[in-house]
Image (cartoon, grey):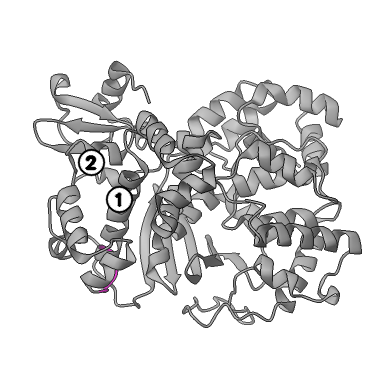
Amino acid sequence: MELDFERCYRAVDSRDQRFDGWFYTGVRTTGIYCRPSCPAVTPKRENVDFYPSAAAAQRGGLRACRRCRPDAAPGSPDWDVRADVVGRAMRLIADGVVDRDGVPGLAARLGYTERHLHRMLTAQVGAGPLALARAQRAQTARILIETTDLGLAEIAFAAGFGSVRQFNDTIREVYAAVPSQLRATARHRPSGTGAGTVSLRLAYRAPLHVDALLDFFALRALPGVERVGDGSYTRALWLPHGPGEVTLSPLPGYVAATLRLSDVRDLAPAVARCRRLLDLDADPEAVDGTLAADPALTAAVAKEPGVRVPRAVDGFEMAVRAIVGQQVSVAGARTVLGRLVDADPTDREQQVEPAEPSAPGERLLRAFPSAADLLALPDSAYAMPAARRETIRTVARAVADGSLDLDPGADREQLTAQLTGLPGIGPWTAAYVLLRAVGDPDAFLPTDLGVRHGATALGLPDTPAALAEHAIRWRPWRSYATIRLWRAA
């Protein structure tokens, strides 16, 4: 990835937080790398190199700055939205695919050879998949060291290292300190709340419109799966190694996250899914700048800057929600989905200590049923027409046998073709899955009734064809425009 030296250096000289995560500053004379917004004295330009990723800086022999903690910066919005192979690979690596399946598993998911994938990532990100996964393991280990009372050997394997020696060597190389030193100097000492409970801060780029996110989730919250209250969002998760639960509380500058995990190996994918759920790696200034250029949206953007796209922690769950939501109200869809959750006998609570309900009568949370779980349910559990029930089962079978990929690393064009090729799934459903499950920043739903009502409220054309034509000016951020139209409705 080409980085313009002058532009990068100006961002560093002005300590511009907007560029945190876009690139990293390496200082040859000190041997460290920093965020662009690092408060330290600006290094001389002749001593500086710029890197597209923390892994690339580490590969260059640099260690993370202890002052600005660049390894914990917001993720690059470029990798968050790009639909090419590199963007898909970065999202899958963040979700822990390399730790679970190795580089061969990642390459197979993307449909490329390991050698070609390594070549593409090195050219664009400055490091191959192993180096990128190693950088993530180091960050995961640091979080566990500083926020839990787990033993260091346990942390080594939980973070994905193959041995304690590899763990020690990596931490020493990346942070210029041994693990015991990181624990001794931790800003937030282990609280003793349990080996599977981790509290951390999720950084984001301001502005973040918190009310828009919480309003969206509150309107669609499934009883028994998720709840919204007191400025926080809590939900159950189904993670690669077992169930979990997360409480997310947006605060100025960061989102406070409390994760309750049945297996701490799931920390990295849980963090990645929470960031994706709240769209924390977005670049709100770029999005709002494009949308505000349309006079119809100028006032809305000025009034509510930083509106994000509420995404998903599980692609299959979101596909089921989209199918159930066809031609029914949001409240009606919640009722039908709630019956599916209640009908599933699978126990996904027993392995994780859940957060206690905050109000009398609230239920403990459990994860949404998996594809295999829904396939095992009788017809009576589906409070919907038979054709829609069979559509859900068709999607569940395809997900269960691996022929349908609903993860954020999925190829968007291929997924759209697969979904619309299934009986009972049309363009609206496919676009909704792309918008929320896959994270496409440019999905649009011109036939959606809420979108059309919002368009009318803002003085925009309300017929699908005319609205779709008008929406071309919002590219490549039509997903964000969709959220704003829903809010206007």
Q: Position of residue 113 (x, y in %)?
A: 46, 40
Q: Position of residue 376 (x, y in %)?
A: 74, 75
Q: Are marks 2 and 1 in contact (CB under 8 Å)?
A: yes
Numbered label attached to residue 134? 1
Give the residue at mark 2.
Answer: 58
The answer to whether 29 is drawn above or below residue 325 in the figure is above
Front in this rendered view, residue 342 or 378: 378
Q: Please check the rendered image and state whether residue 147 is part of the magenta-colored stretch, yes or no.
A: yes
Q: Please check the rendered image and state whether residue 102 is part of the magenta-colored stretch, yes or no.
A: no
Q: Furthest-top residue in view?
A: 6
Locate residue 442 relative to residue 282 in the image: left or right. right
Marker count (numbered): 2
The answer to whether 340 is drawn above or below residue 100 in the figure is below
The answer for how far apart the CA atoms under marks 2 and 1 are is 10 Å
Locate residue 63 relative to residue 416 in the image: left or right. left
Q: Which residues are magenta?
A: 146-150
Locate residue 39 relative to residue 195 in the image: left or right. left
The answer to whether 370 is drawn above or below residue 25 in the figure is below
The answer to whether residue 258 of the structure is visible from this angle is yes
The answer to whether residue 38 of the structure is visible from this angle is no
Q: Position of residue 418 (x, y in %)?
A: 73, 44
Circle 2: residue type = Gln
